[in-house]
Amino acid sequence: MYLNNKPEAGKAFERIDAWLAHEIIDRVPVQFHRHDMSLKIDKSLGWDSLKERWFDSEYQVTRYIDSIEGRSFLAESFPVFWPNLGPDVFAAFYGIELRYTEDSSYAIHSKEPIPDLIDRLVFSKENGYFKKLEEMTKLALEMSEERYFVGYSDFQPGFGAVAAWRNPESLCLDIIMEPDGVKQMLEIATLDSIH
């Protein structure tokens, strides 16, 4: 395992592997990250919406590359690009739309009756959110040039997806008023996620 900006990556992985095997080579592995929201967003690029900015794969990858320029990754910390369209993206794979903010996104919850919602919850690899994450991941891999690893998006299947489809407050009532519908949605959000 080699990264241009972390020549000791091999030793770092040895420490992590040893730790997972309940052993220590020379010290325990140490990993830390500084979350930096101060990276400037170039608003001159002319997006018509925040969603367009989030969906601009080239911008997202280039912005990440700029953010690691000249940075040190100490101990067992590594540069990793995480393709990301927000925490409710798994729910969006089933046809729910997301609304974007500067630094996150959230599901536009369904207000329709649970049986109607269940009828239209269909996972699709042709879904725009799924295709965009796939595109962003491929581009990040192509542009990495051994400068960073490429991770995977923040998926929240299971109850997280059900809450995104309904909204957490409504879901609390649904558990009491329509437990069978909630069970059906939970089955969709868990069984589909393992296929």
Image (tube, rainbow, N blue to C red):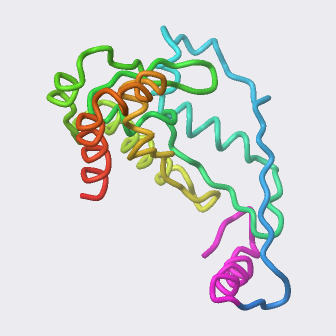
Vertical arrangement, residue 56 with respect to residue 10, above or below: above
Please state the horizontal and vertical placement of residue 105, each as a whole percent of the image.
Answer: 52, 25
Expressed as whole percent of the image width and height from the top left, the position of residue 149 reads 58, 59
Q: Residue furthest left?
A: 119
Pick the front one: 143 or 182? 182
Residue 93 lies, in percent from the top left, at 31, 36
On whether residue 17 falls in the magenta region, the answer is yes
Q: Nearer the viewer, residue 145 or 183?
A: 183
Of 183 and 42, the residue lying toward us: 183
> Within the magenta stretch, is there residue 144?
no
Residue 29: image x %, image y %? Answer: 78, 75
Q: Which region is colored magenta?
A: 1-22
Q: Name which residue lies at 48% across and 52% down.
A: 152
* Residue 161 position (above or below residue 108): below
Quarter placement of the N terminus = bottom right
Residue at image position (51%, 26%) is 54
**Residue 89: which quarter of the image?**
top left
Seen in the image, is 55 located left or right of residue 127? right
For the point 75% across and 69% down, which residue is it?
Answer: 76
Q: In which quarter of the image is the C terminus?
A: bottom left
Asked which quadrant contains residue 124, the reply is top left
